[in-house]
Image (spheres, coloured by chain):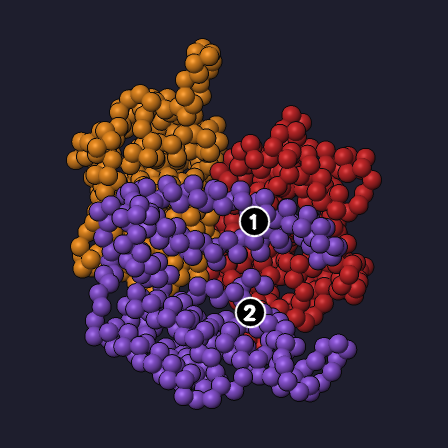
Chain colours: A purple, B red, C orange
Amino acid sequence: MTRDITLGQYFPGSSPIHRLDPRAKLLLTIAFIVYIFVANNFWSLGFLTVVTFCLMAVSGVPVKMYFKSMKGILFIVLFTSVLNLFYGSGPVLVQIGFMQITANGIQNAIFIAVRIVSLILFSSILTFTTSPTELTDAMERLMSPLKSLHVKVHEIAMMMTIALRFVPTLLEETDKIMAAQKARGADMESGGLMQRIKSLIPVLIPLFVSSFRRAYELAMAMECRCYHGGEGRTKMKVLHMVALDYIALLFGAAVLAVVILLNIFLPTVI
Amino acid sequence: MIPLLETQDLCYTYGAGTPFEKKAVQNVSVKIHQGEFIGVIGHTGSGKSTLIQMLNGLIRPTSGKVLLSGRDIWEDPKKIRAVRFKVGMVFQYPEDQLFEETVLKDIQFGPRNMALPESEIERRARAAAKFVGLPDDLLDKSPFELSGGEKRRVAIAGVIAMDPDVLILDEPTAGLDPAGREVLLSEILDYHKKRGNTVLLVSHSMEDVARVASRVLVMNASHLQMLDRTEAVFARDQELESIGLQVPQVTKIMAELKGRGYPVKTCLTVEQAVAQLLPLVRKGDDRA
Amino acid sequence: MEFIKAEDVHFTYDEPNEEHPDAPVHEVLKGIDLSIGRGEFVALLGHNGSGKSTMAKMFNSMLTPTSGKVLVDGMDTADESKTYDIRRQVGMVQQNPDNQLVASIVEEDVAFGPENLGIEPKEIRRRVDEALKAVDMYEYRTHAPYKLSGGQKQRVAIAGILAMETACIVLDEPTAMLDPRGRAEVMDTIRMLNHDKGITIILITHYMDEAVQAGRVIVMDSGRILTQGTPEEVFSQVDLLKTHKLDVPQATELAFRLSNAGCKFPRCVLTIDECVDALVPMLSGKGDSA
């Protein structure tokens, strides 16, 4: 069940996107998320969606994986779209009780759905082509100016690395403990809300206990390997921006220009 | 006689219909009778974990049937919990599942889920604690204060307290030291003899399996490779080695001697080997 | 050449009780003297609670003696200014393969140690590749650890220590949670490191078939050294081991029981082959009706 989750899953490869500096990728992803909200008509949003599909193709990660990552949030997409369906003005197309569906509402629903889907797909490009360590490394570097404000940048990055490392391990453990409690007759599939929350206790307590044990052992293992904070630490993978990264950033700027132009010069359908 | 537990053409496929499809168990048909002690062997990934989890309804077969006393356990999926009370399952490192405030309460978790009367819950929990050799003064302690070996016993008692007709143990001695393994194995064997129920013991230790099992089930690459009397299975040492399994050292020694033409039979324990070898050695002395 | 030396090491986990200074303290180590030479392969045996894991943590200054001394390459483990120098020399691999890998990618995990030491990026790359090749995990360098088998994870953990170029590796029951195939992989790796790379190995285990592969076996019981010597010397004391809740390999036990019954074994046997070879000249009846 929990095996389906693709969160933070990395697919090693050698596509141009894989080779980009993670800092450039992180910045571009943040920029793109902003663009998606800047885009206010179908032309500009459509353009961004096409760009996303092109980048997905360039990434070399199987398209199947992208759609698998959509599975988990399909419900949210449907929910927000359906909600938007009923918030429209203009001529009524369908009347269900007191709720009305208008042409405008349908457009809204589609617009929102496309927005969320491109958002998820674009973030997936980042997580599929960047190893978690690279990602946290990029955050550490980008946030390093904050060090002067006494923000513990290295510690935050290290915590994220470890959290990402242990997500799959803990999911697997959750499965195992649930099976063990079911074998002792625990009923987790029926009953009301309170009943169900109560039935989680036999799973959560063992999970906490084992997490503490893991944390203790991991701390020991890290000390054995001479870990002593960020001071004087080097990295195997040194980040340095090369031509490819500057081209990518320029590309990002160009995309913004196109979005703004499309926003201004093509009619707003909505 | 209807077998207590039977599988017919049992199959399970993970992620059926996706690119990650993996056949874990294929066409396994076995009959297990009341009172048997069965060793289950096979290396990691052979399908033995999936197989045993189908036997108590934790995993629903993709095709095929599991029959308990002749009835399909999935006949009414709503009653699958009742099956889990009859086919008890102790997972690997079961101490990871303890969660109650006291040892006694934790052992009572299973019987309480069965909705038994309070007096019966209490009686069963105490009896189960006795079976696994937990002293009374531990019962009111927090399970998290106990040693590793004691926690293991508490977890096993938690399943025994449901009084299952079939008890499945997945590597109950993993991670214990030799003395701990020895004691726990004896306790399981004792419990089996006194209670007279059916036990399935999954183990990587061929020495343990050879010592306690009356029949051995061998899984290999998602198929049933063998199910036969323990002597008969371990006599096929070369076949076992070809699928990455060992036989006990003493069995191997006797097999080597047999291969060199000495009149010895398959042995499972050191005692048996000594009994067979002593007469032969004496004879050798006489001749010299 | 002496590399690690322990002199009269005592250890107790409890702080002295100030209210009841006479209250009995539970001493885990009760005076351990031992010396381990460079390039040795030592197995440390003992049942749970014998103090062997506590002793293991003394070798790289994870714990320091309550009284007595541990010297690593001449450095006192109690000297805090030397802690990192000692851990550069003596690496440690633990029992649970899941709880000692830090990064989500194999090669990045192996790089963790050298990164902490502040080594040049190019040199780290070289060491990581070399370490992964040594444990035969190079082709898995970009995999996620959680998708590997237990034996593979342990080999990655060993590579993580190798990349620090330590002179000695302490392994605390590295195979206890593995299946037979994983155990064999890890033992092959350990033997290779000792034999081909001359790395000092201290293997804590309660599997006798692993201990027989060592050059020297030290048996601990309730905080003391019970006996030590070559595997032959130690395992020939079958009675002593059994009374201290330890096991011997079945081959050794068979030979022991037969020799108690009057058969003369030329020497202590440890493996299946040795046992068969020793038995054959004693047996008769070959070719008799089987």
Q: State whether residue B159 appears in this view.
A: yes
Q: Quadrant of the C terminus of chain C?
A: bottom right
The residue lying at 41 percent from left, 17 percent from top is C16
Marks 2 and 1: which is nearer the front? 2
Of residue C95 and residue C198, the one placed in the foreground of this image is C95
User: Is A191 situated above or below A3?
Assistant: above
Q: Amino acid at mark 2?
A: Ile
The residue lying at 32 percent from left, 25 percent from top is C65
- Residue C55, percent across and down? 35, 31
Q: Quadrant of the N terminus of chain C?
A: top left
What crowding class fits label 2: few (fewer than 14 Cα within 10 Å), some (14-19), or many (20 or more)?
A: some
- Tell whether A213 sits left or right of C112: right
The residue lying at 67 percent from left, 50 percent from top is A197
Where is mark 1, residue-wise? B92
- Residue C73, percent across and down? 19, 34
Find the distance from the CA under tag 2 to the CA under tag 1. 34 Å
Q: What label does residue A73 carry, if any?
A: 2
Q: How many numbered discs?
A: 2
Q: Amino acid at mark 1?
A: Gln
Tag 2 and tag 1 share a subunit: no
Secondary structure under the numbered disc 1 in the rendered image: loop
Image quadrant assignment for residue B153: top right
- Residue C57, percent across and down? 34, 35
